Amino acid sequence: MSEVKLAASIRTEFGKGAARRVRRDNRVPGVLYGHGTDPVHLTLPGHELLLALRTPNVLLSLDLEGKNELAIPKAVQRDPLKGHLEHVDLLLVKRGEKVTVEVPVTAEGELAAGGNLLEHVLNTLSVEAEATHIPEAFTVSVEGLEAGASVLAKDIALPSGVTLAIEGDTVVLQVLAAQAEEPAAETAEGEAAAEA
């Protein structure tokens, strides 16, 4: 996992008006907290942060007025209509420290013939990993799986140093049989529509 370097500045003004002024300057207000320290209110460059957040669980290397800090995004607030970043909460981490994160799960391969459907019971998998080695995603092969088959959390291959933060018997993906519509119900509706 690569680090994204961002220049951050400490925020001294608070409230809606101050936050609007920060956003008008194409910066995003945020809070950095963790390790029993007092929260640090800061601003981050808007465009660079938006690009960095495209990678799930990105590791941010913050240059906070001469002091370097490592952080991962914990909560991101976006404008519901425009999608602009409104606020970000960052969790302070240290090299070698283990953190619990949600990692996206993707499926690859073709299911067995027969019109089966793949249901993503969980879109992300909760794992514990070293802050500097968080996997970007887990890819699971569903090649040839038939209706009734499921992939459990313990079935997903995890990289070295990564452990599950949920029960191993939790269903992540399952294959469902395609539901066929009853033709009798369709003809009865068609006849009723024709009579009307």
Image: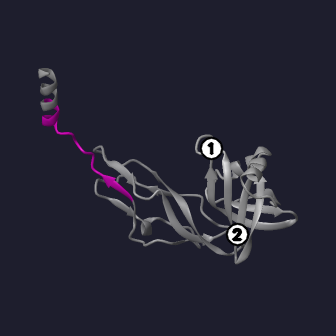
Q: Which residue is mark 2?
A: 33
Q: Type of residue at label 1?
A: Gly
Q: Quadrant of the C terminus?
A: top left
Answer left or right for 116 relative to 20.
Answer: left
Q: Does residue 135 belong to the magenta stretch?
A: no
- Mark 1 surroundings: few (<14), some (14-19) or many (≥20) residues within 10 A: few
Secondary structure, mark 1, is loop
Vertical position of residue 11 compared to residue 178: above or below? below
Residue displayed at 62% across by 44% down = 83
Secondary structure, mark 2, is strand
Q: Does residue 180 belong to the magenta stretch?
A: yes
Q: Please provide percent x and percent y for residue 169.
A: 38, 70
Q: Please provide percent x and percent y for residue 18.
A: 77, 52
Q: Please provide percent x and percent y for residue 151.
A: 39, 61
Vertical position of residue 155 compared to residue 7: above or below? below
- Mark 2 surroundings: few (<14), some (14-19) or many (≥20) residues within 10 A: some
> Which of 28/19 is in front?
19
The residue segment tinted magenta is 173-187
Q: Quarter-wise, where is residue 103 in the image?
A: bottom right
Q: Is residue 48 visible?
A: no
Q: Type of residue at label 2?
A: Tyr
Answer left or right for 98 relative to 20.
Answer: left
Q: Which residue is mark 1?
A: 83
Vertical position of residue 167 compared to residue 16: above or below? below
Q: Decide: marks 1, 2 in contact (CB < 8 A)?
A: no
Answer left or right for 113 relative to 5.
Answer: left
> Which of 13/192 is in front?
13
